[in-house]
């Protein structure tokens, strides 16, 4: 497994988007999240996927965790460089996706589908559907190595933004539970996020993340109760008073997601 980080560092992308290469020269490679439309990065990915003779572009599949602009736009660029045009796989973007995140893979993955590479050593990449950050988000587990490629669902060093309507907090929390189950069942040892470095102790990391979200949600609920006539703009500085103000425009999206989830929970409680 090899990681190449795209040169797109920033507030939302941390050190840049991590592209991961699974496989080896004998089997060809699966490229996970080729990244933003950066020609230099695409060229480096192509060169890194070399066959036994050192020729680049030995790519069996290009897999996208979701369709955001820092993950998927390089997929057709990389595909076009490869003589055998490897298929782009993932999930099509939902109608709720912003226009810049429209995405149609060559082939849509099935939940739990295993992508196989057979070379000197087998590589089995299992798709785990994880809507929440984006409606078409999917994570991948490399079964032989116990690695979870978490896309933007779990990040290292920053918090995943849930941006309704394509983002959905209830789905995000359910997907965290699904990832916890998958990590337990498949013996995952490390999480490899799309932004930031490798994370150890996946079960603890996921439990911590869920607790963090629910703690924030409890704070949002308390602020809403204290200001029942308020709105997102008046609740924001109170619910995120522990976060730097320059983050608030982004936090406002996740606040909306929390408010929507609280409203959904309240609606379900009604007789
Ligand atoms: Zn994203």
Image (spheres, grey):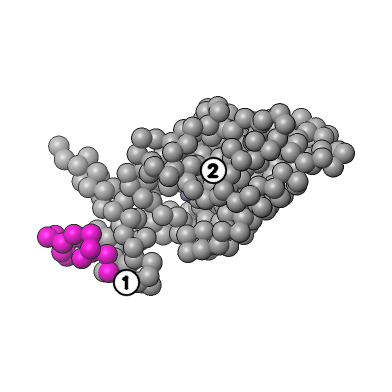
Mark 1 is surrounded, within 10 Å at the Cα level, by few (under 14), some (14 to 19) or many (20 or more) other residues, namely few
- In the rendered structure, the answer to whether residue 25 lies left or right of residue 108 reads right
Separation of marks 2 and 1 at Cα, in angstroms: 34 Å
Of label 2 and label 1, which has the lower sequence position? 2
Residue located 23% across and 59% down the image:
232
Q: Which stretch appears magenta?
A: 223-237
Furthest toward the left, the residue is 229
Residue located 31% across and 51% down the image:
257
Which residue matches tag 2? 72
Q: Are marks 2 and 1 in contact (CB under 8 Å)?
A: no
Residue 208 appears in the figure: yes
Residue located 68% across and 38% down the image:
81
In front here: 248 or 118? 248
- In the rendered structure, the answer to whether residue 117 lies left or right of residue 9 reads right
Where residue 212 sits in the image (x, y, percent)?
41, 59
Magenta stretch secondary structure, dominant: helix
Residue located 53% across and 31% down the image:
105
In front here: 193 or 93? 93
Which residue matches tag 1? 241
In front here: 114 or 43? 43
Q: Residue 59 is drawn in which quadrant?
A: top right
Q: Residue 61 is drawn in which quadrant?
A: top right
Give the answer, above or below, for where 247 lies relative to 263: below
Where residue 256 sits in the image (x, y, percent)?
28, 53
- Residue 166 among those drawn in magenta: no
Q: Residue 116 is drawn in which quadrant?
A: top right
Q: Secondary structure at mark 1?
A: loop
- Residue 231 among those drawn in magenta: yes
Q: Residue 93 — which label?
A: none
Q: Does the closest atom of ligand 1 sit within 8 Å of the Cβ of label 1?
A: no
Report the quarter where the C terminus lies: top left
């Amino acid at each position: 497994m090899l990681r190449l980080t795209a040169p797109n560092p920033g507030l939302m992308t941390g050190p840049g988007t991590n592209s991961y290469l699974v496989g080896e020269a004998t089997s060809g490679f699966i490229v996970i999240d080729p990244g933003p439309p950066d020609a230099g990065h695409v060229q480096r990915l192509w060169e890194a996927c070399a066959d036994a003779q050192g020729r680049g572009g030995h790519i069996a599949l290009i897999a996208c965790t979701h369709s955001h602009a820092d993950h998927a736009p390089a997929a057709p660029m990389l595909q076009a460089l490869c003589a055998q045009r490897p298929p782009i796989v993932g999930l099509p973007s939902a109608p709720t996706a912003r226009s810049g995140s429209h995405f149609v893979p060559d082939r849509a993955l099935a939940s739990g589908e295993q992508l196989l590479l057979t070379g000197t050593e087998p590589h089995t990449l299992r798709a785990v559907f994880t809507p929440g950050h984006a409606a078409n988000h999917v994570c991948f587990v490399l079964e032989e190595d116990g690695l979870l490629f978490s896309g933007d669902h779990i990040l290292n060093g920053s918090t995943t933004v849930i941006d309704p309507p394509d983002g959905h907090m209830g789905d995000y929390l359910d997907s965290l539970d699904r990832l916890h189950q998958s990590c337990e069942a498949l013996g995952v040892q490390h999480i490899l996020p799309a932004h930031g470095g490798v994370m150890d102790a996946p079960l603890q990391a996921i439990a911590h993340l869920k607790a963090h979200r629910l703690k924030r949600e409890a704070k949002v609920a308390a602020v809403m109760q204290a200001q029942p006539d308020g709105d997102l703009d008046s609740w924001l500085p109170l619910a995120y008073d522990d976060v730097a103000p320059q983050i608030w425009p982004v936090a406002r999206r996740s606040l909306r997601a929390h408010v929507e989830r609280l409203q959904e929970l309240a609606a379900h409680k009604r007789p």
